[in-house]
Amino acid sequence: MGTIEAEPVIASVPVQRAQRRRPRERSLPYLLLLPATVTVFLTLLYPVATMLSLSFQRENLADLVTHTTTWVGLENYRTVLTDRFFWTVLPRTLGFAAVCVGLTLVIGTGCALLLQAASRWARTLLSLALVAAWATPVLIGAVVFKWLFDPEFGVINYLASSAGVCDCRHHSWFADPWSAFAVLVALVVWGAVPFVALSIYAGLLTIAPELAEAARVDGAGPVRIFVSIIWPMLRPLYAILTVLSVIWDTKVFPQVWLTTKGGPYQGTVMLGVYIYQKGINNSQFGAASTIAVLMTVMLLSLSWLYVRAMRDEAR
Amino acid sequence: MQSRLLFRGRISPSRWLLALGALVVLAGCGSSTPEAATDSPVTLNVWLMKDSAPDSVISQVNQEFEAAHNKVTVKTQILDWDGRDAKWKTALPSETPPDVLEMGNTDVLGYAASGGLTDLSSRSFENQDTWLQGLKEAGSYDGKLFGVPFYGGDRVVIYRKDLWQKAGLSTLPTTLTELTAAGEKLRADGGKDFSGLYFPGRYQYAALPFVYDAGGTIATRSGERWTAELSSPQSQAGLTAWADFVRRVSVAPADIDETNIADVLGQGHAGMIIGQAWMVNKLGTDYPKLKDQIGAFAMPGSNGPMPVFLGGSNLVASAAGRHPDLAYDWIKAMAGTKAQTALAGAGLLPNTTSLASAVTGITAIQLQAARNSWFTPTSTKWSDVDNNKVLMDMFQSIAAGHASVPEAAKKADAAIDATLNGG
């Protein structure tokens, strides 16, 4: 998955200079794109349109059950934007995403460089481990982490206590917001690193080994090689990995819901969980949709900025 | 599309008419009298909750129901308590909602007010006059009956006889002071990681009785307005007594709920828990060695038994269900004397006081405890307070020492006032 997605980015420059083709040849790609486009429209556009329309409706439990539509204009937007808790949750979500994305990229790069440098069997072992983590469904990963850190029956507490690191029987990792966040960051980064690592590894393979060889002859150390050769060549790849990671880590939901449920005292509530609490728990489906719309707009504009910056750089 | 598949090749006009006629007949049956079409097989969808009526009782009711109703199949699904709201809120507005649902007695009001449930006031049920008052009230909204009492349940102290003996304890405590002493003795005897009575901080339905024991309450109503009362001197005294009790007898974390308590007792990390009666049977099954070592008694209060939360479930029929008569028949069977007697045998409180003489053992202890019971505020918005974990957060912050009793109570009161009186 990672390698397939990564390659077009690197190859994008030559593709743009394709020669002019005949009309029939030019219509074929569009024809081939049609089934996917239709599917995307049906599965994505309908829910998005519903979400947008709900954000202008009252839609409480009674409205939902009896299929009543009450338009309220911008009322939901006014409520959400003047909600103090929303302004706590928003920066928290962005901060969490920033930490996760940063760690993911750093650890991912480390793993990729290790994959390149390691011997064959070590490389196989590492790739297997990465693929296994990547293949683990988010839900299962979250449940496994919850049990690892369980205060009574968790392996982490057991091992730490047995090894004499600390006396942490009954220690609750989710009782304090900071330690709860630490576990959440570990869980999210653990799930995100494989994709990034394998993508960067694929990118590394496209760099001609002669370049590093020549640099080494000129006396460059590993840091210099990374800064002067690898980083500039893989910059577009890093850009797209950052955009994707920002999107994934901002809309994080199952990892939080299955472990902390937003606790302690709402301290780990982030946008995804807040939408769920508003919508499903409190039956304010209109307000919940409004937050979802705001979040979508935010992520779209963020991605758009990145993509534009990337395109400008490629020119 | 359908006719294309049925009539391959060219379709003559007469066949078109025939098909059209058949459609009209079918549509007519579907809309006017949904249950007249007994010729075609019907599936009655029933959604029950986990840890509710035992499988044996459910399958017996279903068998008899299917025998009495030709070509009707009952399809039972078991839902987890956690996340039930999401499933109900998705299913009730849909084209094909489940016909019968079990709801926790704190859940019914909100859904009844939304218009999603069928008014069952005009239907008759066995033992209707002797239903448990608390369950009947939990199922009534605006003077109408929406939720038929299914079963009740309250919490009792479950203890390990072997560990009691080891600690040299014999007589069962009848006051909170005696219970505290027993808990402290067990804890001293069991070592550092051992709880005399394992009491997680977020276990609200075991902690709230302390508030009622001290004469406090969650909220009171005057007219349409609710006033949260956790900051009242009585409620605060109860919260303080609870915090003191937990500190003395338990080493359980402050931030977890009661999910694991049965296993904590079963694996020997505690001498007692406050649990639901069915846990006694479950412990015997999960830990066969302990089969004869599990006992139970009513939770003692400062003066007589502690007022328990009367939990339990009601059976409701969805308003948009396709088979209202069948749904009624099924609810009637499950709420009837025969099924209720079987339920009582399995450790659940039957929905009627008329079966009081039929209950024995753990159920009798529960019934005795239920004589002095209380219920959460009967507001349609209470489930929002519940979903927002207002009380759990309050108890956790006190147990963890993150807030003093007055601070935590004040914060919870503000949240309860805002939610119950909000638009």
Image (tube, helix red, strand yellow):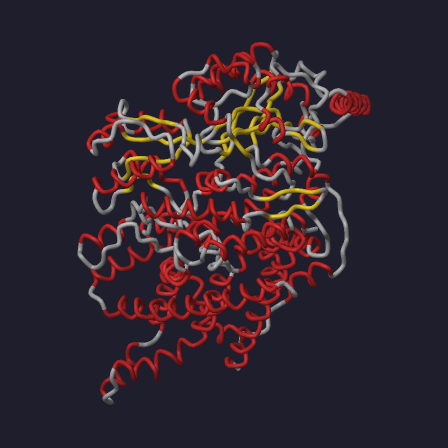
Q: How many marks?
A: 0
Q: Quadrant of the N terminus of chain A?
A: bottom left
Above-or-below relation of A7 to A219: above
Seen at 48% across and 51% down, the residue is B394
Compared across the picture, whether B352 is left or right of A290 comes to: left
Of A237 and B237, nearer the camera is B237
Seen at 45% across and 58% down, the residue is B403
Above-or-below relation of A196 to B187: below
Residue A47 image point, x, y percent: 63, 51
Compared across the picture, whether A160 is left or right of A232 comes to: left
Compared across the picture, whether B318 is left or right of B284 comes to: right
Q: Residue B142, can we see it?
A: yes
Residue B298 image point, x, y percent: 40, 28
Of A216 and B93, nearer the camera is B93
Seen at 46% across and 18% down, the residue is B344
Above-or-below relation of B287 to A293: above
Q: Residue furthest bottom?
A: A218
Of A248 and A212, nearer the camera is A248
Seen at 43% across and 20% down, the residue is B364
Above-or-below relation of B201 to B352: below
Residue B149 image point, x, y percent: 58, 24
Of B338 and A209, nearer the camera is B338
